[in-house]
Image: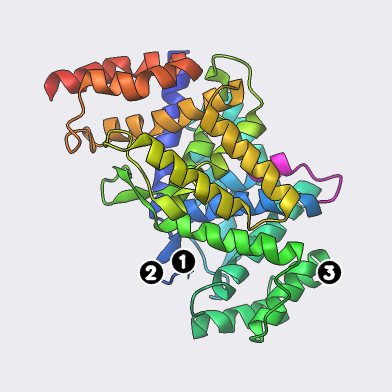
Amino acid sequence: MTSRIESHIAFLNEADKLKTVERSNVLMNLSRAENSAEHSWHLALYALVFAPIAAPEVSVARVIRMLLLHDLVEIDVGDHPIHLDTDWDAVAQAETKAAARVFGLLPPDQAADLTALWSEFEASTTPDAQFAKMLDHSQPLFQVLYAKEPLADHMDIVHENLSTGRASYLKSSFPEAFAQASLMAKGEQPDQDTDMSRRLAFLAEADGLKSVYRATRILDASRRENSGEHSWHITLYALILAEHAKRPVNLDRVIRMLLIHDLVEIDVGDSPIHGDHDISEMEAAEQAAADRIFGLLPKEQGTALRALWDEFEAATSDDAVFAKSIDRVQPVICNLETGGGTWPEYNVTAQQLEDRVGWKVAKGAPAIWDHLQTRIRAWFAAA
């Protein structure tokens, strides 16, 4: 068991590097380049939001899993913008090699499963992979079109992409997205009171989570982690660590919870677990934020996702208890990997860590908390 957990953590720590891979797209507020980790989270959220349009033969749960891991190979090979001349055969070979290395950090059974899922996405021959690819080809368009002031050169890429590029096929495979993008590319505003517009407005609003910074640092210690990439990372944590849940859980419900659990921070910001807060004031602000943000969606869908968020916050169901344990353990591992990280900054004691974090992790995933005890005790003994 311990060796499996060690392999799991080694893989999840390696995955952290995806937060430093920059893409050619920029955030909608134009502040910086988007990275591949937050892009992967945003795409998984796209799959969740566009689930109602998926064909009956598509498993959106599998699509979300594909999109969570589809760019992990970029840790080794980087991102390759579609508008640049590229030897795509060479890229494919390099990505296959990267997949073998990155997924090979996992126990053999999980490595085989995730490699197969990644390969399915790349081949794009199954309904699940085709739906995932369709979203992967749509999101960059709207990342540009919903920007505060779309960049001229990025708009040129959108025009080319829609007319003759890789997104041109969306005219038949995803006509609602193609029509919306085409109108916006011409400077026209589509009807804002359609399900398509409401879903895209929600997804555009979600981009703001990439600009909410947390206390925790990424593993190279170069900067604070943002809540978008954090949401991606803990969702990947859940996928990898589900076997360690104390009680049986519906993993796909847990994944959906973790994709949306921090969206309220767009309005209220992050509240570090070791900071001092007025809990009742914070909860009231988060409730108001949930009302506003989930209210952007079509009513039935917004109500369903809001209920899932409420379930996570209440943390009484088995799914929510495990999701909370994953949300709490990731920063602990990040701090251990960065020499204590922000624990000294917040004057964290061993008892405080146990009181505010440990019991919540142990409630949902006791084997993981037990596994970390040696390292935790050693760090506080030396601090």
Kindly report the distance in space between the C-alpha atoms of the residues bearing marks 3 and 2: 34 Å
**Sequence-first disc among 3 and 2:** 2
The foreground one among 99 and 159 is 159
Q: Is residue 18 visible?
A: no
Instruction: Quadrant for the C terminus, please.
Output: top left
Kindly report the distance in space between the C-alpha atoms of the residues bearing marks 3 and 1: 28 Å
Q: Amino acid at mark 2?
A: Ser
Q: Is 219 left, or right, of 72 in this rendering?
A: left
Mark carried by residue 31:
2
Picture layout, residue 374 above or below residue 348: above
> Is label 3 in contact with label 2 (beta carbons under 8 Å)?
no
Picture layout, residue 185 above or below residue 49: below
Q: Amino acid at mark 3?
A: Ser
The foreground one among 346 and 102 is 346
- Residue 57 located within the stretch drawn in magenta: yes
In the rendered image, which residue does mark 3 sit on? 172
Q: Amino acid at mark 1?
A: Leu
Residue furthest out toward the left: 382
Q: Is 70 left, or right, of 77 in this rendering?
A: right
Q: Residue at x 63, y 54 (%)?
A: 295
Q: Is residue 172 visible?
A: yes
In the rendered image, which residue does mark 1 sit on? 27
> Is label 3 in contact with label 1 (beta carbons under 8 Å)?
no
**Sequence-first disc among 3 and 1:** 1
Q: Secondary structure at mark 3?
A: helix
Mark 1 burial class by Cα count in 10 Å: few <14, some 14-19, many 20+: many
Q: Residue at x 44, y 49 (%)?
A: 265
Kindly report the distance in space between the C-alpha atoms of the residues bearing marks 2 and 1: 6 Å
Give residue 291's position: percent from left, percent from top: 57, 50
Magenta span covers which residues?
54-64
Mark 2 burial class by Cα count in 10 Å: few <14, some 14-19, many 20+: few
- Residue 61 located within the stretch drawn in magenta: yes
